[in-house]
Each structure stands twice: as C-alpha cells, then as structure tokens.
C-alpha cells in the first residue's frame, strides 16, 4: 500500500504539470481556431447575404418569381452556399437548394426575428433533416426605408467541426504520449525512494506490534540513509525501554496479585486503569472486564467512588471506612486513596487501597465480649465466696448447722470457679494450638464409651435413662482421644442437665454418608429457634438461672465447636421447645474405614 501511494504521488508531480499545460494550451488553441473559423464563416455569409440582397431587391421591385428563384439557384451553385429570399411575412420566395413551396414559414426563425429588432440576425442550430449544424445569417431587403423582405445565407459547419475534432484528437494524443513518458520517468525515480521507505515502514509497523529486533540497512549516504540509521537507533532504544517497562509491569502485577489488600487505580476521568482480584472480590466486580470503564459502572459501592472523587478534586490523601452488609456479618474495609502523578508532577489519576479488617474487627469484638463475660462469670463465684467467708468470720456464734450450710455453699462456688477456670484453660489451649500435630489414627468408639460410662451414673442419680448405641465395627478417624472424650462428655452432660427427672437421653456413634457421627438426643426443655444460632458462643446460655443453678459455665458447647473444627468436623443442633434437642458432631472417616453396623450397649 505504501509503494502504491508514494509511487503515484511522486509520479503525479510529473503528470499534473504536463496535463495542465497540455489542457490549457490545447484548449486555448481549439477555442482560437473555433472562433476564427466561425468568424470567417460569419463574414462569408454576411458577404453572400449582402450580395443576395442586392440581387433580390431589383427582382422584388419587379416581381418575376420564376426568374428570382432561377437566379438564386444559379448564384447558390456558383458560391457553394445556400441562399434564401423571404418576403416580409416569412414566406420563402426563392431558395438555392429547395422548392420554395415545400418550405415552412420562416417568420419565427431567430435570425429573421433578430433582423426586425437589430437590423441583422445570426443563428446556429442543428438541422435534423440535413443531419448537420447550420449557421444562418439574414439581412433586410429595403427600398428607401421600406422593408421588402429578407436575404438569408446559410452554411453547414460540418467541415469546421471535423477540423476541430481532428485538432482535439491531436491534442489528446500528444498529452497522452507526454503523460505516458512522464509516468515511466516518475515510476523509475519513485522506485529509488519507495524501496527503502517500504522497508522503513515494515520496521515501524513491527515496532508498533512490539517487534523491536528488525533493523534497516544503512549503507546509503543521503537523507534516506540518515533516516534509516535514526530509525535503527529508535528501535534499539524502544526495545530497551519496553523491556524495562514490561519487567516493572510484571513486578507490579505480581505484587498486586499477591496482595491481600484490594487496589484500584483510576485516571482523571475516573476510568479504571488497574484492579486486582482482592479489590474485585470486595467490590463485587470482575478485574478483567473493569479496565477502561468508569468506576461508578464497575461497582455499586458508592463510598469508594466518592473517596476517589474527593482525592481527584483535592489532590490529597483521603482516609475513610467502608461497611458492607453481607449475609453472615458486616464487612469492614479501611480505605486510603492517594493521588497519582505523571512524570511532570501533574495529577494523572488516583489509587485506593482497600484493607479488609473484618476479621480484626470481629476478633476485637470477641475479645471485648470475652473479657467482659469472663470477668462477670469469675466475679460472681468470687463475690459469693467472699461474702460467705466474711459472714463466717464476723459471726463467731453461728450455729454449727448454719456454718455447715455456708461451708457447703463455699465449696459449691469454689467448684464452679474451678470448672470455669478449667474450661477457660481448655478453650485457650484449643484456640492457641498450632495446627493438628497431636491428631493420630484412633477408634472413635473408645473415647465415646469412656465418656458415656463416666456420665451414666450422673444420669441415674437425676432419674434420667441414658441409652447408648455404638457401632460394632471400628470407627477410625484422625483425632485426639482426650479432646473427643471431652466433646462427648460436654454434649452428654448438657443433655442430662437440661432434661427433667424421668426423661431420656440417647447417645449414638455411627457412620453416615462417609462421616463418623456422634449424636446426642434428649427430651429436655428444647431451644428456641432464635437461640439455636448462638448456643455455640462463649458464655451464651438459653436459661441463665438454671444454668448457674446446675453449675454450667457457658463454655461447654463453645469447646465442643472448637474440638470439632480441630478435627475438620462440624457440629449442628436441631431442637423444638418443650420436646427436646439433638446435637450432632460429624468427622471425616479415615480411608481404611468400611461400612459397619451399630449395636446397643
């Protein structure tokens, strides 16, 4: 394409002057010839018409039609022209070539009408009957100022048109030959320039596509050689810069991709320049399809758009906090927006860093709640023990029965305090355990049976029947036996505590859907739906008064949940108020585990 355009543009520099000069000279020559020829014809017709007028005047004064027509015909043959004598009304009296009676009235002809208004008339028109262009010239025939008629001479212009056509042909042929010679000359000269320019274009297009390895031959010593050498230097410089840019860009993309913080960069028009996956997750947008789109089209989080807008307007850092409502809990995001500057220090855009502090916020809330709840739970037995001891000290004369009652209450409160501290230590150990280094292959039936046997007497003391069902085949999992004993104990102890005398408790160990399942079912008071989602929280009690009366610490189910998580399991609750509750803890089975039956102990 470059060869075609450049060659013909260069060739046009030769063709255009030749074409214009030929057209101007040829046109002027043809026009001059045409004007001269037409002038000669007009003068000839004027002389012929004047001669005819003199001849016809005498005949019109002494009318002899046959003599006039004969004379006009003879005269026309002698001068090789068509002569016509017309009366004042336009009737043809004599014609050198036609029978006057066969001709139409000529009063309306332009040349006749011009004679009436101007004293003479000339008209040129195409004669369809003769098939040629004819020039007509008419003069008045007068006698002492009285109009007797009109003398008209006419002549075909075919010979003139032929000469003009021949001249046009010569002009066109000469122009064509001159332009053809110029075209060959122009293309020959253009080839010398087009070839290196085409090579330069190929190198430039390769650079535009990212190919900087191509180079041009630089042997020429003219301006094209200088241009080739300059283009080679440009290609080398661009290659070095592009390699640096790509390296820096890859480093930046790797950093952005590896960041847990979300990063969004926009230009001055608030169109997205860059967005990492962390930002896309927070804003609910796709980083791949967000580039070049306005930030307000990419996300519906209005606060992010406002923060970037404020940074672009002020040119300063802007800090803000963003809260997003999710299904589980509110997401808290810290935002820091900073201006982006170009190489000249001018504002080119803005970048915002989104730091998700939801977990930190949640942990701080949990820590505050834990400290408050632990303080409250520890304060209650300590205050009770202090009050009872002070009473015993102050009342030395207290009866022995009352003293024994006070000491019994002190013992109960100390036991409660000991249980609370033990559960807190257990919970702390479970939460701070790094990974699962103590998990080993075990048969889950052993810790299950140990827990059931330990609490069965407690159930009998309270008048509650404890039913136990355990698999006949080994239930092998990766676990901590001591922790699993505590999990089963806490679930069974809760069931016994919150089941009234005469009730029943079922505790089962089985496999279901490829998992080991510990299930504890009771006929106790049940749990309301709004409490079921919170029973595994620390210090949460459905019936606080009864829980304290029974010595509960409010940490048992929280410990159960942590033990299940450590064993890569889950814990669930199903309950109906007034009917009872069912707690289930599931654990993944080791690959060696096979289907088995259950049996009742």
Image (cartoon, grey):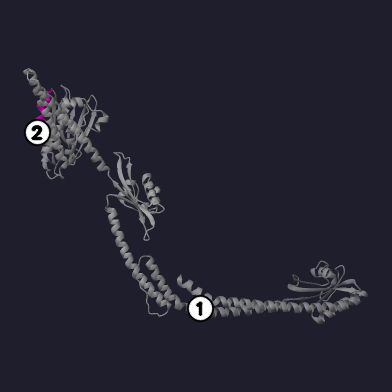
Instruction: Judge from the rendering whether residue 526 lies leftward or rightward of residue 9; answer left or right.
Output: left
Magenta segment boundaries in residue numbering: 447-462
- Sequence-first disc among 2 and 1: 1
**Which of the two residues, 460 or 370, is positioned nearer the viewer here?**
370
Instruction: Judge from the rendering whether residue 122 lies leftward or rightward of residue 599; answer left or right.
Output: right
Q: Measuring 16% from the left and 42% from the top, which residue is drawn there?
A: 432
Tag on residue 338?
A: none
- Does 496 sit above or below residue 167? above
Residue 483: % across, % down: 13, 38
> Which residue in the protein does label 2 denote?
450
**Which of the two residues, 524 or 171, is positioned nearer the viewer here?**
524
Verify whether residue 403 appears in magenta. Answer: no
- Of all residues shown, which one is farthest toward the front? 394
Verify whether residue 449 appears in magenta. Answer: yes
Residue 455: % across, % down: 11, 29
* SS state under label 1: helix
Q: Quadrant of the C terminus?
A: top left
> Which residue in the protein does label 1 denote?
186
Q: Measuring 38% from the left and 70% from the top, which residue is drawn there?
A: 203
In three-dimensional space, the C-alpha distance between marks 2 and 1, rounded to whole angstroms, equals: 107 Å
Residue 225: % across, % down: 40, 77
- Does 265 sit above or below residue 204? above
Using the rendered image of the protein, determine whether residue 212 is visible from the camera's viewpoint: no
Residue 574: % across, % down: 23, 31
* SS state under label 2: helix
- Of all residues shown, which one is farthest toward the bottom? 78
The total number of labels drawn is 2
**Which of the two residues, 345 or 30, is positioned nearer the viewer here?**
345
């Amino acid at each position: 394409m470059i060869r075609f355009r450049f060659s013909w543009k260069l060739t046009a520099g030769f063709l255009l002057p030749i074409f214009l000069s030929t057209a101007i000279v040829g046109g002027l020559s043809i026009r001059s010839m045409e004007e001269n020829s037409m002038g000669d014809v007009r003068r000839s017709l004027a002389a012929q018409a004047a001669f005819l007028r003199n001849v016809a005047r005498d005949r019109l004064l002494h009318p002899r039609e046959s003599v006039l027509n004969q004379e006009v015909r003879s005269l026309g043959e002698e001068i090789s022209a068509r002569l016509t004598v017309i009366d004042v009304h336009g009737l043809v009296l004599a014609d050198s070539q036609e029978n006057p009676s066969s001709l139409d009235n000529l009063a309306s002809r332009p040349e006749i009408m011009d004679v009436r208004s101007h004293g003479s008339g000339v008209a040129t028109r195409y004669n369809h009957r003769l098939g040629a262009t004819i020039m007509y010239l008419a003069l008045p025939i007068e006698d002492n100022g009285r109009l007797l008629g009109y003398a008209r001479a006419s002549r075909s212009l075919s010979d003139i048109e032929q000469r003009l056509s021949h001249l046009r042909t010569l002009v066109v042929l000469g122009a064509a030959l001159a332009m053809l010679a110029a075209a060959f000359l122009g293309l020959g000269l253009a080839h010398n320039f087009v070839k290196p320019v085409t090579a330069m274009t190929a190198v430039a297009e390769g650079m535009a596509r990212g190919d900087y390895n191509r180079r041009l031959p630089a042997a020429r010593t003219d301006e094209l050689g200088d241009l080739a050498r300059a283009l080679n230097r440009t290609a080398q410089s661009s290659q070095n810069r592009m390699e640096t840019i790509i390296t820096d860009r890859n480093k930046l993309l790797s950093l952005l991709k590896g960041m847990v913080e979300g990063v969004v960069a926009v230009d001055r028009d608030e169109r997205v320049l860059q967005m990492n996956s962390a930002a896309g997750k927070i804003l609910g947008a796709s980083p791949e399809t967000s580039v070049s789109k306005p930030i307000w089209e990419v996300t519906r989080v209005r606060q992010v758009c406002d923060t970037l807008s404020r940074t672009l307007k002020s040119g300063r850092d802007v800090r803000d906090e963003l809260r997003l409502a999710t299904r589980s809990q509110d997401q808290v995001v810290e935002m820091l927006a900073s201006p982006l500057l170009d190489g000249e220090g001018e504002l080119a855009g803005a970048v915002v860093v989104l730091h998700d502090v939801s977990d930190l916020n949640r942990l701080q809330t949990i820590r505050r709640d834990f400290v408050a709840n632990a303080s409250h739970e520890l304060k209650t037995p300590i205050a009770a023990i202090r009050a009872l001891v002070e009473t015993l000290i102050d009342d030395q004369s207290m009866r022995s029965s009352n003293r024994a009652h006070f000491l019994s209450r002190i013992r109960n409160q100390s036991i409660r305090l000991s249980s609370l501290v033990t559960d807190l230590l257990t919970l702390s150990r479970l939460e701070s355990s790094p990974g699962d280094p103590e998990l080993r292959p075990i048969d889950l039936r052993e810790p299950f049976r140990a827990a059931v046997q330990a609490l069965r007497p407690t159930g009998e003391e309270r008048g509650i029947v404890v039913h136990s069902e355990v698999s006949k085949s080994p239930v092998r999992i990766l676990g901590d036996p001591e922790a699993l004993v505590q999990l089963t104990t806490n679930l069974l102890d809760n069931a016994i505590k919150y089941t009234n005398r005469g009730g029943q408790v079922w505790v089962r160990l089985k496999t279901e859907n490829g998992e080991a399942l510990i299930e504890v079912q009771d006929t106790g008071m049940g749990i309301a739906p709004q409490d079921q989602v919170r029973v595994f929280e620390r210090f949460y009690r459905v019936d606080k008064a009864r829980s304290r009366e029974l010595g509960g610490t409010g940490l048992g189910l929280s410990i159960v949940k942590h033990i299940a998580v450590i064993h890569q399991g889950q814990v669930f609750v199903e309950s109906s108020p007034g009917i009872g509750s069912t707690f289930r803890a599931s654990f993944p089975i080791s690959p060696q585990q096979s289907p088995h039956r259950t049996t009742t102990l």
